[in-house]
Amino acid sequence: MTIHRDMFDKPRGEKKMTEKKPTRLVPPSFSTEPTVMVSGGFDPIHGGHVQMITEAAKHGNVIVVANSDEWLMRKKGYVFMSWEERAMILREIKGVTLVAAVDDSDNTVCNAIKMLRPDYFANGGDRGKSNTPEQDVCEELGIRMLWAIGGDYKFNSSSDLAKKLIKNYPK
């Protein structure tokens, strides 16, 4: 099942609020297993992503938050694979129970963490306390952090793969 930010209608008469309080999308009874959230652009998806998700699945059911196409444009300046295509591939990885699209307009997945409330928030080998803005939200909500999931180094890079493609196959 994929939850997309635009799939629910707003109730009639709903007034625009300056501060939105996130609604939890996954009920506590969603799973008896712990839940582990991983996030990323996954554009293009590669073996390092699969390795990270597979290792995260050793800790519980995996919720994948794939960043939006708009986030990719802000970060990289291009979208190699659409969100829908990335989600389709991610759903097929063993251990993934949910692929979610969220509001990442603040360049974080803090809203996803607040809405989905996983037991763990897992980070790959290229992330640490200095470059993980979601850490404060996790601490506030009692969500445990998992570091170096998939290895303590970056197995591959989507940006590097795209650069190699352009270098090896110019117009």
Image: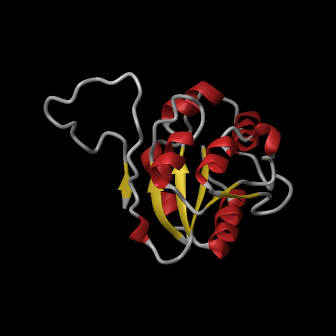
Residue 85 % position (x, y)? 46, 50
Image check: 34 left or right of 52? left
Residue under the point 55% across and 59% down: 118
Q: In this view of the protein, can residue 71 be seen by the observer? A: yes
Residue 157 % position (x, y)? 75, 46
Residue under the point 33% across and 24% down: 17
Eyeballing the image, is 106 above or below 118?
A: above
Image check: 156 left or right of 100? right
Quadrant position of the C terminus in the picture: top right
Residue 22 % position (x, y)? 41, 41
Eyeballing the image, is 85 above or below 171?
A: below
Q: Nearer the viewer, residue 87 or 139?
A: 139
Residue lying at the far left in this picture: please name it.
12
Q: Nearer the viewer, residue 124 or 117?
A: 117
Q: How is the image coloured?
A: secondary structure
Residue 104 % position (x, y)? 52, 35
Residue under the point 42% across and 48% down: 84
Eyeballing the image, is 51 above or below 72?
A: below
The quadrant holding residue 55 is bottom right
Q: In this view of the protein, can residue 44 be seen by the observer? A: no
Quadrant position of the N terminus in the picture: bottom left
Image check: 13 left or right of 51? left
Eyeballing the image, is 102 above or below 32?
A: above
Q: Nearer the viewer, residue 100 or 81?
A: 100
Tally the numbered discs. 0
The quadrant holding residue 137 is top right
Residue under the point 45% across and 73% down: 31
The quadrant holding residue 7 is top left
